Image (spheres, helix red, strand yellow):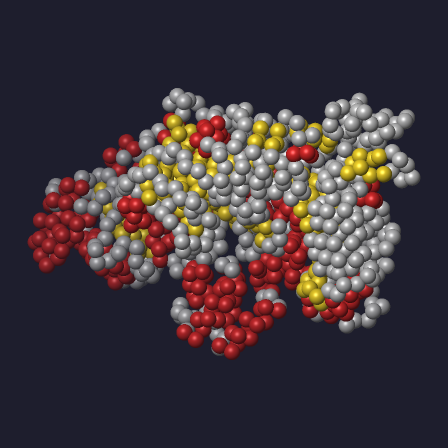
Amino acid sequence: MASSSSSPSAPAFSSHSWKYHVFLSFRGEDTRKTFVDHLYSALEQQGIYTYKDNETLPRGESIGPSLMKAIEESQIAVIIFSENYADSSWCLDELACIMKCKDTKGQIVMPVFYDVDPFEVRKQKRKYGEAFAKHWLENKTKVESWRKALVDASNLSGWEPKHIANGHESKVIKEILNAISQRLQLVTSSADENLIGMATRMQRLKSELQIESNGVRMIGIWGVGGGENVREESSKNGLEKLQEEILSLVLKQKKVKVRRVEEGRRVIICKLRHKKVLIVLDDVDNLDQLKALAGAHDWFGEGSRIIITTRDEHVLNAHRVDVIHNISLLNNDEAIKLFCKHAPRGHRCIEDYELLSEDVVSYAGGLPLALTVLGSFLCDKDIHEWRSALARLKEIPDTDIVEKLKISFDGLKPIEKELFLDIACFFRRELTEKTMEKLDACGFHPVIGIKVLIQKALITISDGVFDMHDLIQEMAHYIVRGEHPNNPTKQSRIWKKEDVLRLFDMNATMKLDKIEAIKFWHATDEESQHFVHVAANMKKLRLISLKTEESIETTRPLPENFPPRELCCLRLQGFKQKQLWEGYKYLPNLKNMELIALEKLIVTPDFDGLPNLERLTLTECYCLEEVHPSIGRLESLVALCIIDASCLKSFPPITRLKKLETLIFLDCFQNCKPLEFQQQNNNNIPHLQLDNGGKEVGSYKESITNSLVTCWRCGLSNLPGIKCCLDKPCLPHNNIDLRFSYRGLSKLNLSGCELGDEYIGSCVWELPNLQELSLAANNFSRLNFSLLKLPRLKWLNLAACFNLVELSDLPSSIAVVIADGCSSLESFGDISNCKWLWKLSLLGDNKLYGDILLHYMLQGNAIEDHFISLTLEHQMIPKGVVVRGKTFTLNLPDNWYNDFYGFLVHIVTDIECLKVTIIIMEKVDDEDSRFEALKEESNEAMDPEYINGTTTSIGYVSFNSLKHTTLLNSSYNRISFSLEETYRNPDAVESYIGAALVPRKSKGDEVQTTDCSGFWDKERTIHEKTFRVQHDSKSCVKIIWHPFNWY
């Protein structure tokens, strides 16, 4: 194994500008045509620029000064000590110069002892002793310096070829080559100032490459684009040329001819399958490129590494690379360094430019391409020109940047382009779920399209909202505005208020057939009235989002030709009309309608002209009294949401809504009783219906023979000659029974509807596909799920049900229960069969025992494959050692991954907005100050103190749940825990924290894997998920736990 050292005064990897990578010092007559010749050839093949006197020295030039200069300009000196090396005073002069450069310039020295023993060199024995005796007679002045150089060089670690691989020189040369390559890589990475921010990013990439391991690995590097290679070259010259280039470079042959791609594939397999190669394929954008250039692992020899960079993650997934490395953008400090490298010149920032430099860096958003382009442009500009350039960028983006970024957009299919442009223009930072509904209404099939956009690094989804890089959005705006940035009539999408106002100033007869979607927010009453008349002329308009701030109450409905007939998605907010339109209006393409804060609306529109309406939302329509009966004939309706409609007097039957999946009535029906008898038209037959929440009744009192009973499932009544889908559309009972049966419903929200025991106690629900149910803020005292047939229920919200005393017979499918504020709750029933239950939130006073609940949760499926979160305001027996403070460290024993299911963390605190950071890592010998602080805080175990407002949170993480984190391994031996406040509470008291491992029932039990779909991770929070694996790397796995809910 070769290594080298340097003097303390000169760092081994200095930033000196070297001309040569390697200088070879050798005795020509011993090794020139053998070992040195083979070593030199191997170095050249690896692209290592090597000085070898008879190969590099120009004819006729004096060898003395040139040789000494070559030594001084070489990063590494390899000295081949052979039998007759010391005979040559020239070799000894080289050696003395090399050792001087080692001490003064930080040159790396690597000795090779070729057929000589290091002892002979160090002590000048045998041939070396004879040579020095001769030199003593001929050149006494240099002998001592030569002797010292020999001693110093022979004390360095080096190679003895005869003792390595049984003397096989090729293997020795390979080992030397690897050592030189590694040292050069370190030198280059530390000295190359162009690669700002590269060191931290290379650390993880190196671990993923697994350089020391055998086998073939393909590593994908994915992110926002900036360069071109494979994509551009294949489009220009074809894949055959790229195949020729790979073969030529690897085989060191100047001419390689490939006629067809299939032929190239066969040649690559044949020639390279036993070669260890490193191939980098830059900016791949098509799977066919990879199939032609690096089709499979077995195309290459053991130890080969194939690195693929791309803007499209799908290409990497489809090719089944071993690792996908998502490259991060530059942080602010790195961005400043890169920008200042290019502007101004001289690698320094001018003080006057500091604020403007920060503006440029903020604009670039960490994108190296933008920083380089803008820095190079501004490098010779004065401060006034900088200000002008920045002002222009806000209106007109830099075309060099846009065109580079646009490459990913150009690779999309037409429907994907439309989808991306809609998100960039209208829905950035909007909730993903609601946006997907609108995009689906426009016919964009967003589920698959969004996946493509994410894989192309054009958009992201973070915390349930769409986002993208600022410059990616700017590129989209540039595409839409195109050649007519100041003429909105020529644009497909309008989202800026100033562009909408420009439309008002144009000729009223002008055709507006280019505009497909328009957003106009913060409009005055006059502007909104003007808008609806202008929009009526937009014949191709599919999406309207209109929000007015200063509307005036009016009885005048909207214009007859508004909204336009082709509209797919309509969002109106803030209007003060009592009625939107009169009578029948035919809008055959309208699928999504949101009516928000129409505070004076009394009656909804007639829905008969909207045959394809799929989603209807009515929110904050405080004066709404009547929903038009035609709503019951919307056979395409999938979701119906009515919130804050407290004046609603009744709700029509919706028995024909066979596709309904989501039904939400929140804070409605406060002016009517939950159950009413109403008269059939011109008939004395009472029609029994439940108008609180639109819940149809399929039941009757057996003794009442003239009741008209309507079945929820099929909408038919018990009139003579009509056969219902049920044998009995009711359950005879002494009291009125209610049957709520709807097979398609998956989400139901009846929060704040004043449901009491008289409804819940007599209601029979048959909702076989219901998964989410919210009954929050209602008045019932008991909830027995044996009457509510909900076999697939996963998520249950009972928050603020202050009168709830008993909860029983939860379905075995349940995963999440929120019962915060249920202050009367005494019984949770038997949950021993609830094997999927992993989250319980029971904040507020109640009479439940958390230890019992946790016991049953730990008996379920989560113990092996998931997380557990239990939160309540009660004292519990501490799980493991608990200490005062906000940090704790748990050391892992040997074989922890096999002997333990996972770990529990126990927290007692009054922090209102709590975030717990959990880091699983490998403990290092050299403890840093942070972990020393952890030890100091975690040194005293104690029982927590409980006061009013103090909550107890128990979290659990199974090791098996992190199996997707491929770098989780048995070398980790520590878990750290820390509490963080998302905002500071000045009155916060002491917190307590502790943790414990959960042992397997029998040590060494085989790890079982569960189908995790039953745990239901579609939590309906407005902030973070309860548990999130935020980051994983070679050194740690990071988990964020949010114990509290914000629904």
In the rendering, at what x and y percent does residue 555 appear?
82, 61
Is residue 1045 placed above or below 383 in the rendered structure? above
| Residue 360 seen in this snapshot | yes
**Is residue 393 toward the left or the right of residue 596 in the image?**
left
Quadrant housing the N terminus: top left
In the rendering, at what x and y percent does residue 41 appear?
37, 46
**Is residue 811 toward the left or the right of residue 15 in the image?**
right
Closer to us: 274 or 651? 651
**Is residue 21 toward the left or the right of residue 595 in the image?**
left
| Residue 205 seen in this snapshot | no
Is residue 345 placed above or below 789 in the rendered structure? below
In the rendering, at what x and y percent does residue 224 appear?
55, 53
Closer to us: 1034 or 740? 740
Closer to us: 520 or 816? 816
Quadrant housing the C terminus: top right
Q: Quadrant of residue 288?
A: top right
Q: Residue at x 90, y 26 (%)?
A: 721
Q: Residue at x 64, y 51 (%)?
A: 411
Q: Residue at x 73, y 41 (%)?
A: 673
Is residue 605 placed above or below 401 in the rendered structure? above
Total numbered badges shown on the rendered structure? 0
**Is residue 196 toward the left or the right of residue 545 in the image?**
left
In the rendering, at what x and y percent does residue 950 appear?
42, 44
Q: Quadrant of residue 1003?
A: top left
